Amino acid sequence: MTDENGEETGEDVALDDTWNYADILWNGIQAEKVQRAFEKLNFREQTLLEKRLAICMTCGRVSSWKGRPTFEELAVMFEGSTASGAERAYRRAVDKLTELLVAEGALHAARLKQKSKTKRKKKIAAAVYEYQVDCDGEWGKISLDFENGTAEIIQLADWDTMKTNRFANKVISYLLNYENEKLPKETMIVFEL
């Protein structure tokens, strides 16, 4: 390495040999939670996730994203299934893994169900969604006005906080930023708090 005068310093400033042990430990704990949750899935669910996500959960090897199988190819692997059937099975496996990771405390999730919507000029003007926190407890309800970009929490779900409404606010932000014509009827959003 050279300094600003062009002289050799012998020091490699690009090398960062500091370790953040808290991050390493945290990531190790999270990896253990993911592995435990993954092991609770059945063989078909594990295979769908590993193949579609191009990762081996046993050794951690990540394959090329381009080489991952299509839903048609996954359907052939599970004889008798269609591409849309393989995609539905994959989405169910993702949801099940999400629920298991929530139970492990690795992440948070909110399950959403659209209860009603109002359209004006082929766009959704307003909608009402129910939401459930961490896949457990009573459902809350949120009303959204897409024309004005506003929302109202009608009822908080169990486990949401009275002061910050942290889960409801995540749901509102997610839905208000979603492409209007493609608002989901049902979905699960995942986040860390």
Image (cartoon, rainbow, N blue to C red):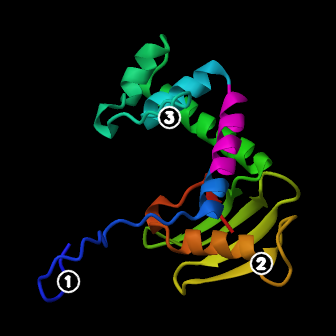
Task: Residue at 69% x, 49% y: name it.
Answer: 29
Magenta region, main secondary structure: helix
| Quadrant housing the C terminus | bottom right
CA–CA distance in space, label 3 to label 2: 37 Å
Work out whether residue 188 can be spotted: no
Residues rendered magenta in the picture:
28-41
Task: Residue at 55% x, 31% y: name it.
Answer: 57
**Apparent side of residue 120 relative to residue 106 in the rendered image (left or right):** left
In this picture, is 88 found above or below 193? above
Which disc number belongs to residue 60?
A: 3
Q: Residues within 10 Å of mark 3 (few under 14, many from 20)?
A: few
Residue situated in front as seen by the camera: 104 or 142: 104
Task: Residue at 11% x, 83% y: name it.
Answer: 6
Spot occupied by residue 74 in the image (x, y as percentages of width and height): 43, 22
In this picture, is 51 found above or below 148? above
- The kind of residue tagged 1 is Asp
Residue situated in front as seen by the camera: 103 or 183: 103
Spot occupied by residue 84 in the image (x, y as percentages of width and height): 46, 30
Label 2, on which residue? 165
- The kind of residue tagged 3 is Gly
Which mark is in front, 2 or 1?
Answer: 1
**Apparent side of residue 49 relative to residue 3 in the rendered image (left or right):** right
Label 1, on which residue? 3
